[in-house]
Image (spheres, grey):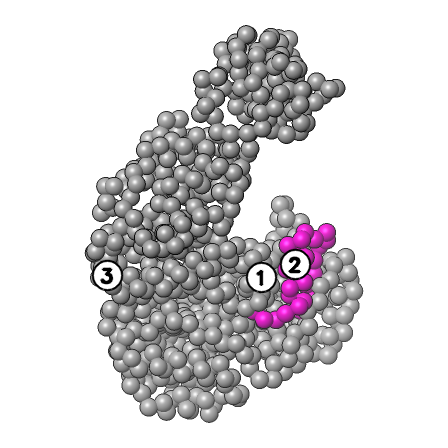
């Protein structure tokens, strides 16, 4: 149960004056991304302003600068309503101060309301942007009109918030003010020494300063109020991850025992030598497996750095110790691809491997499930289908999750719960900047694969305007005659009214006119069989061009493919471009990647394409991607239900994330159940930043 002292923070915005059902829906869309979720005060309090409007300039009319926001003290002289039935003429109010006269203008106005708000002869403070027409000062639709008595409460520095349809800045600010009004100070969850060292205010004071700034400096990401709140958010995030970790570690692990024969046979059967960083990662995994604790390890490797081989070696050790292994991939295509890539090796050393996806027929699925439960399958590769209750293992020892950022913390735990003391190995081909590794995988140990397998040549990357399409097709023809294979990636499946993008289907048609049956098409809306047939025709058959959507972004492996064309490259994120480029350059032949763009390019698009030309280092690219796009997009957190951040900027607040990680580990060591006095306050923190799932773990543990 959430403590009563937090009720005020979690009260619905509809409890505030002026927020009816319709406005509350707009707030829900703005703050929670969904009109069906309730917008609460805490959601609004953590909605950070991005700028300020300064109304503090109060000049005499004659000295007021043009085109600037001013606040004037005026006497109202006369109302000039428009002629009846002529909506095009504005409603005008004449006023003056001691130095000059001014016109206040409203379009489509309610005259009765304006007469009550500004009666003739009254003194009013009017704030808005002043402009001069033919030398006459004018303010159109002022933002504030208040009496002398109310002027004391008018905000002269006004925060500006991100908005959505149906909400004005004034409405948001008014609702924020109402939410702040009777905020109860909460028990302090941060250490006193830290607050003193950093000069940070209390939580409720920091909120008050951000929403009632004295100037733009208060909204700076490095201001003391913003850093205090960002550290709170970092600590909530790291504490939640540490609780997940300690919960998993608490569930006793098995110290696995094996001789290493299977791994040796596999290594012998490989047509290449493992790189130094692959051997290092395997050693780290083996160290974890031998401990009586559950393994939680993330293997991060750049495109084509050989993660699958690392996973296979780990699987061999666990299978030799007498348990089963499951490997989960995000798509049907990828699961089958993994199966194909390891099948021959597994059969050579006697590992019984099978594949299972949602696309299998009921009969095939029944057979697989029976064999799995009886222990006749050592290594099962599949998709989300592996989560289903009907999937029962005889003894699941290791769960391998591929393409990690598609799965949240709880999903990865669900899979490892299918066995007793199941170890967990997670692989991602998206190099993740260090700050984000801490943010989203603080519960995991990390192994890095930094080398490319021997014999891989660098990929030559060029940019080319779409105007030169004809020239590109001509060059392609020459390459195909020499036996080359080419991927051609388009951003959409079919023509869209909104984006002027040549869709994959149209591009397939136009290339077919030139190259005939040498062109295949693959996209997400095709059935599994259609995709499989297209892939096989490209991989082993006569097709030399595969036109595709980003279905091929992950894991598709055709070593003969040496050319990658990415159409409308300016529409893709950096990480995605890098992933796509990694589909070529997998054999020993020289490969190239052509980024086709539609000019004129914006600055960010230009920077992205230049970065692609400059480097193949996935970690450098990931850092640049984070800078250009923000962490939610880099990790796909907006789709995958992982926590994005409301207050923290991962780049600016890097140091805070490191501090929070150390602090969280220390807290869990000292008070694993958060039962002490500070522990109680830290539970408030987890609730406030939406990490209550961690509190459920505390109760379950």
Earlier-in-chain disc, 3 versus 1: 1
* Magenta span: 593-618
Note whether residue 393 is visible.
no
Which is more N-terminal, label 3 or label 2? 2
Instruction: Return the x and y of residue 13 as percentages of the image width and height.
Output: 36, 34
Measuring from the top left, give residue 341's x and y in whole percent.
Answer: 49, 78
Quadrant in the rendering for residue 31: top left
Relative to residue 53, is residue 319 depicted above or below? Answer: below
- Provide residue 696's location: percent of width, then percent of height: 26, 55
User: How many numbered markers are drawn?
Assistant: 3
Is 188 located above or below residue 429 in the figure?
A: above
Question: What's the distance in space between the residues labelled 1 and 2, CA to CA?
Answer: 9 Å
Mark 3 — residue? 671
Q: Which residue is mark 2?
A: 607
Which residue carries the number 1 mark? Answer: 624
Q: CA distance from mark 3 to mark 1?
A: 38 Å
- Badge 1 marks a residue whose secondary structure is helix
Q: Quadrant of the C terminus?
A: bottom left
């Amino acid at each position: 149960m959430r403590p009563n002292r937090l009720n005020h923070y979690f009260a619905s915005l509809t409890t505030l004056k002026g927020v009816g059902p319709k406005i509350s829906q707009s707030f829900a869309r703005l703050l929670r991304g969904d009109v069906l979720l309730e917008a609460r005060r805490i959601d609004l309090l953590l909605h950070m302003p991005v700028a300020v409007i300064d109304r503090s300039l109060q000049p005499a009319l004659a000295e007021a600068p043009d085109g600037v926001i001013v606040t004037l003290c005026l006497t109202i002289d006369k109302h000039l309503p428009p002629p009846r039935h002529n909506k095009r003429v504005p409603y005008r109010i004449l006023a003056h101060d001691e130095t000059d006269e001014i016109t206040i203008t409203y379009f489509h106005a309610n005259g009765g309301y304006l007469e009550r708000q500004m009666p003739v002869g009254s003194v009013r403070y009017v704030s808005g942007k002043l402009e001069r027409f033919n030398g006459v000062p004018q303010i159109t639709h002022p933002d504030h009109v208040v009496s002398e008595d109310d002027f004391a409460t008018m905000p002269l520095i006004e925060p500006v918030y991100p908005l959505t349809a149906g909400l004005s800045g004034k409405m948001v600010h008014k609702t924020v003010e109402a939410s702040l009004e009777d905020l109860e100070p909460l028990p302090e969850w941060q250490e006193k020494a830290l607050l003193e060292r950093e000069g940070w205010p209390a939580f409720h004071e920091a909120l008050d300063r951000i929403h009632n700034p004295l100037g733009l400096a208060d909204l700076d990401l490095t201001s003391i109020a913003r850093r205090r709140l960002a550290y709170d958010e970092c600590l909530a995030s790291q504490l939640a991850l540490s609780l997940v970790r300690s919960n998993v570690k608490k569930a006793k692990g098995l110290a696995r025992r094996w001789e290493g024969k299977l791994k040796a046979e596999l290594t012998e059967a490989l047509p290449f030598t493992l790189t130094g960083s692959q051997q290092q990662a395997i050693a780290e995994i083996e160290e974890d497996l031998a401990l009586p604790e559950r393994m939680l390890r993330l293997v991060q490797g750049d495109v084509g750095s050989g993660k699958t081989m690392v996973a296979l070696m780990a699987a061999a050790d666990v299978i030799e110790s007498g348990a089963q292994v499951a490997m989960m991939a995000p798509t049907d295509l990828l699961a089958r691809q993994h199966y194909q890539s390891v099948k021959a090796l597994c059969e050579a050393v006697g590992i019984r491997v099978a594949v299972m996806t949602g696309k299998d027929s009921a009969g095939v699925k029944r057979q697989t499930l029976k064999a799995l439960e009886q222990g006749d399958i050592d290594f099962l590769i599949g998709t989300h289908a592996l989560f289903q209750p009907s999937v029962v293992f005889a003894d699941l020892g290791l769960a391998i999750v591929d393409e990690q950022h598609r799965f949240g913390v709880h999903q990865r735990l669900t899979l490892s719960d299918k066995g007793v003391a199941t170890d967990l190995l997670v692989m991602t081909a998206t190099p993740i900047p260090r700050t984000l590794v801490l943010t989203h995988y603080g519960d995991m140990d990390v192994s890095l694969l930094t080398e490319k397998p021997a014999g891989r040549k660098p990929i030559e990357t060029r940019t080319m305007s779409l105007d030169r399409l004809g020239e590109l097709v001509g060059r392609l023809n020459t390459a195909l005659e020499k036996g080359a294979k080419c991927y051609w990636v388009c951003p959409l499946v079919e023509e869209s009214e909104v984006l002027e993008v040549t869709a994959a289907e149209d591009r397939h048609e136009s290339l077919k006119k030139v190259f005939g049956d040498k062109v295949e098409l693959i996209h997400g809306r095709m059935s599994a069989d259609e995709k499989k047939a297209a892939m096989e025709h490209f991989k082993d058959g006569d097709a030399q061009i595969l036109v595709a959507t980003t279905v091929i972004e992950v894991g598709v492996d055709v070593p003969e493919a040496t050319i990658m064309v990415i159409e409308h490259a300016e529409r893709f994120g950096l990480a995605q471009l890098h992933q796509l480029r990694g589909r070529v350059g997998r054999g020993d032949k020289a490969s190239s990647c052509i980024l086709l763009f539609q000019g004129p390019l914006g600055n960010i698009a230009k920077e992205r394409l230049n970065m692609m030309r400059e480097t193949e280092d996935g970690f450098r690219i990931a850092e640049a991607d984070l800078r250009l796009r923000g962490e939610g997009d880099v990790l796909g957190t907006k789709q995958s239900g992982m926590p994005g951040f409301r207050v923290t900027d991962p780049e600016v607040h890097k140091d805070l994330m490191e501090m929070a990680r150390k602090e969280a580990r220390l807290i869990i060591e000292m008070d694993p159940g958060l039962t002490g006095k500070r522990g109680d306050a830290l539970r408030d923190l987890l609730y406030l930043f939406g990490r209550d799932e961690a509190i459920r773990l505390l109760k379950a543990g």
